[in-house]
Each structure stands twice: as structure tokens, then as C-alpha cells.
Image (tube, rainbow, N blue to C red):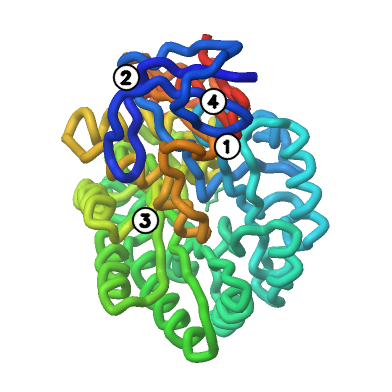
């Protein structure tokens, strides 16, 4: 299938590359006119490199009532993602080379967004014995993490960093101190106190980031190691990271669409749709995260797409599970709320969805030039409301339902193949 995308505005992490007719031939980009089978109108639309999500819960195996690979990877394609890193907190957790290989096999048969499994850092994500980095990587795991759980044993984390580091695998951490977080269901502060609900203090995150940075220093005495901080949510955590990067520690970080657009104020509704770990924080934290994106302290936007069944999310705030589904809205949400409404540079936003996360995994950048791999996303600036009932994800609810957003993906190509097209 040969495709022409006519008159598209090319944009990648280097900035605007002008308007061009882009031909897609044998999975590659060319600007040389050739016979095509299909033409897609690109006028007034942006053509970007495909997005990579470092952090999605696709729930397979074991929790397919919440999501499975076919719905999750279609949701990703609809969100403009060509590549997705799946979290291993499934049932059972993905902690063996066989489990990693099985996931990759099932995903590649679907022909949707490409799957890059993360594997557990410890067996069963139980925090007792380290998994086998070399064999997991050979099977296709791209990072190791016990995400969903916290790494309470610092010595074990050090060992994990050293072993994964020997194979250039990053270790990603859900940085919350369990003894400070306790049973908090939302940010600890004004709102939790007004509502009388158990709070999770920002210090739970900051204390754990401080510890993990020291653990990283210790691991680095033994050999190479790379630490990735997931879903950064606090101003103080950002300050710690900024300092760590200033002195050259090999640490990277991600922020989520929800921490960048919502705050603890949303919890006044008592609606568990806003219940997420780490919790939505204060406006000051949110502003700090946006600054962190701008200055480069935060390397990537990652979704932490965390689907649950509606029945689970309709429990009361104390009993509902943590998590917000967002693969299908992440880009338009941030395009609208950050770029359109407050002038956040589009070039940097695109980098945070493409080269930023790619770099965390050690992948080369994708530039829109002759011969580039045609894993691309076409974005339409026309406004459209968020309609959860039309999500491909099984989690058909959203904190942003009804928000009118611009910048929706209308075509997602993986190696020249359309994995999503809005007709
Ligand atoms: O909100 C969250 N949901 N945070 C996590 O760490 C885990 C995730 C999930 O698996 O539902």
C-alpha cells in the first residue's frame, strides 16, 4: 500500500520542517512523487513522528475485564501512539522471559501499536528476589519495574540497578514511601482535611526520590546504572531531580497528563474517577511540573493509562481502585491545555511524546526526512469533545469527558501501515 499525505505541516522534535507532500512507500517516508493507492488530506494538519508511551497498564494477562492487548493497543493507536511500554503488574506479574515473549507474540499478531513489555524487577513484584535482567532483555523487555508497587528494600533496588545496568536496561520506580503514604486516597492537604479523608503527603514521593537517588549513586560505584522516575507529581520531587541532573546522575523522569491538568481540588466532588496513585496534587505542584517539562528536568510525558471496570470505579472513594485511563486523550489534552491555552512550545511538546521517551529507552530519534521509518501520527487541530463512550479502551470513562480539545490524531501509521484512521 502506497500512501500520499498531501500538504501536511511537518513537525518533529527539531521544530517545524515546512509543508510537504509526503509519500509512504514500503514503510518509509519519501518526498519523491510516485504512484499511490490512497491519498490523505494533510492540509492544516500536523504530521509528527509516532508517539511512544513509557507507561501503560494493558492488564493482559489476567485482568482482561479491565483491558486487553487488542483494546489497549487500539486505544494507543487512536491516541497517536505507535509504541507502548506495558507495565508488568498483571495477574500473574510479567517476570519471566517466557511471559515477555508471549506478550510480544500476541501483540505483534494484532498489528496495532507496537508493544514493548516492561518486566518486573523482582519475582512476582514481591520485593524479595531480583529477576534475571539478561534473559528478560533477550526476550524483549525494555525496562524493569515493580510499578504499581513500591520498592521498599533499598538494597534490592541497588542490586536491580546494577544487574539491569550491566545490560543498559533502565529501572523505573514508582517513587512513594509506603510508610508515609499509608492508606492515603488523595493528596494530604487542605482538601483531604476538609473532606476528612486519609491523605498521601507529597513528602512520601520526595523522600523516596531522595532515597532512590542515593541508591543510584551507590549502584554507580559498581558499574553503569540508569534510574527512571515514573509519574512525578510534586514540586519537591522535581527539585530533587533537577539537582540530581545538574550533577550528572543518569536519571530520567516522566509526568502524566492527569498530573499536568488536574489538581486535588477535583476530589471535592468525591468522585473516585480522580483517584490515582500518586495522587493529584496542588496547583503549585502542577505549575512546577509544567516548568519541569519546559526546562528539561522531566524527559517524557507518559500516560500511566490505568483502566479499571466502571463497577470498580463506582465504589466509594475509599474502596475504588487507583487509576485513570487516558491513552486516547493524552495528546489532544496537552496540546489544548498547554500549547493552545498557555503557549507551551509545540516543538517541546512533540519532543515529550517522541524523542524524549525514546531516549529513556536508548532509542534513536525519529526525524521527518527522506528515508525515515513511516511510523507517524497526523494531528487535526479542529476542536472535538472527549466522548468516553467512543473509546476503544474498555474503560469508557474519563475525568475529561465533555472537555473540548484540539489536536486529535486522525491517522496513525506503523511502518507505513494504518493502525488507526478516523474516517
Ligand atoms: O493509579 C495507579 N494505577 N497507580 C499505580 O501505580 C498503579 C495503577 C494501576 O495498575 O491501576
Mark 4–mark 2 Cα distance, whole angstroms, equals 22 Å
Element assignment for label 1: loop
Instruction: Give left or right: position of 349 versus 6.
Output: left
Rendered location of residue 314, percent (x, y): 54, 30
Which is nearer the N-term, disc 3 or disc 4?
Answer: 4
Rendered location of residue 126, percent (x, y): 68, 68
> Which residue shows up at 45% across the image and 45% down it?
366
> Which residue shows up at 60% across the image and 36% down it?
308
* Residue labelled with disc 3: 299
> Which residue shows up at 46% across the image and 64% down it?
228
Does 74 appear above or below 178?
A: above
Callout 4 environment at 10 Å: few (<14), some (14 to 19), or many (20+)?
A: many
Q: Which mark is in front, 1 or 3? A: 3
Residue 249 in view here: yes
Element assignment for label 2: loop
> Which residue shows up at 42% across the image and 42% down it?
367
- 91 or 372, which lies in front? 372
* Residue 24 tag number: 4
Which is nearer the N-term, disc 2 or disc 1?
Answer: 1
* Residue 381 tag number: 2
- 328 or 138, which lies in front? 138
Mark 2–mark 3 Cα distance, whole angstroms, equals 25 Å
* Residue labelled with disc 1: 307
- 317 or 135, which lies in front? 135
Element assignment for label 3: loop
Amino acid at each position: 500500500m502506497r500512501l500520499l499525505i498531501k500538504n501536511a505541516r511537518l513537525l518533529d522534535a527539531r521544530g517545524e520542517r515546512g509543508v510537504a507532500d509526503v509519500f509512504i512507500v514500503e514503510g518509509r517516508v519519501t518526498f519523491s512523487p510516485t504512484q499511490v493507492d490512497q491519498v490523505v488530506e494533510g492540509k492544516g494538519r500536523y504530521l509528527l513522528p509516532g508517539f511512544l508511551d513509557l507507561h501503560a497498564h494493558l492488564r493482559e494477562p489476567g485482568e482482561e475485564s479491565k483491558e486487553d492487548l487488542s483494546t489497549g493497543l487500539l486505544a494507543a493507536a487512536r491516541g497517536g501512539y505507535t509504541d507502548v511500554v506495558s507495565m508488568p503488574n498483571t495477574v500473574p506479574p510479567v517476570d519471566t522471559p517466557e511471559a515477555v515473549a508471549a506478550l510480544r507474540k500476541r501483540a505483534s499478531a494484532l498489528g496495532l501499536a507496537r508493544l514493548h513489555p516492561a518486566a518486573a524487577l523482582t519475582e512476582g513484584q514481591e520485593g524479595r528476589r531480583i529477576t534475571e535482567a539478561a534473559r528478560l532483555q533477550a526476550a524483549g523487555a525494555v525496562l524493569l519495574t515493580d510499578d504499581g508497587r513500591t520498592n521498599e528494600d533499598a538494597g534490592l533496588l541497588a542490586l536491580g540497578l546494577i544487574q539491569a545496568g550491566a545490560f543498559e536496561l533502565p529501572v523505573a520506580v514508582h517513587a512513594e514511601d509506603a510508610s508515609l503514604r499509608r492508606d492515603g486516597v488523595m493528596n494530604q492537604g487542605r482538601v483531604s482535611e476538609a473532606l476528612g479523608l486519609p491523605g498521601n503527603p507529597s513528602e512520601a514521593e520526595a523522600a523516596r526520590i531522595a532515597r532512590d537517588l542515593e541508591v543510584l549513586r551507590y549502584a554507580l560505584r559498581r558499574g553503569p546504572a540508569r534510574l527512571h522516575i515514573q509519574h512525578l507529581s510534586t514540586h519537591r520531587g522535581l527539585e530533587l531531580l533537577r539537582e540530581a541532573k545538574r550533577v550528572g546522575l543518569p536519571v530520567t523522569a516522566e509526568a502524566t497528563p492527569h498530573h499536568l491538568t488536574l489538581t486535588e481540588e477535583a476530589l471535592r466532588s468525591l468522585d473516585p474517577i480522580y483517584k490515582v496513585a500518586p495522587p493529584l496534587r496542588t496547583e503549585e505542584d502542577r505549575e512546577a511540573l509544567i516548568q519541569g517539562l519546559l526546562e528539561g528536568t522531566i524527559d517524557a510525558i507518559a500516560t500511566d493509562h490505568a483502566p479499571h471496570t466502571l463497577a470498580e470505579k463506582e465504589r466509594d472513594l475509599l474502596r475504588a481502585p487507583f487509576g485513570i485511563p487516558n491513552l486516547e486523550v493524552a495528546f489532544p489534552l496537552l496540546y489544548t491545555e498547554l500549547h493552545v491555552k498557555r503557549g507551551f512550545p509545540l516543538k517541546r511538546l512533540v519532543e515529550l511524546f517522541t524523542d524524549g521517551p525514546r531516549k529513556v529507552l536508548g532509542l534513536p530519534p525519529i526525524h521527518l526526512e527522506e528515508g525515515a521509518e513511516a511510523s507517524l501520527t497526523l494531528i487535526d487541530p479542529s476542536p472535538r469533545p472527549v466522548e468516553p463512550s467512543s473509546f476503544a479502551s474498555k474503560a469508557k470513562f474519563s475525568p475529561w469527558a465533555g472537555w473540548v480539545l484540539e489536536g486529535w490524531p486522525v491517522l496513525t501509521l506503523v511502518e507505513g501501515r494504518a493502525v488507526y484512521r478516523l474516517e
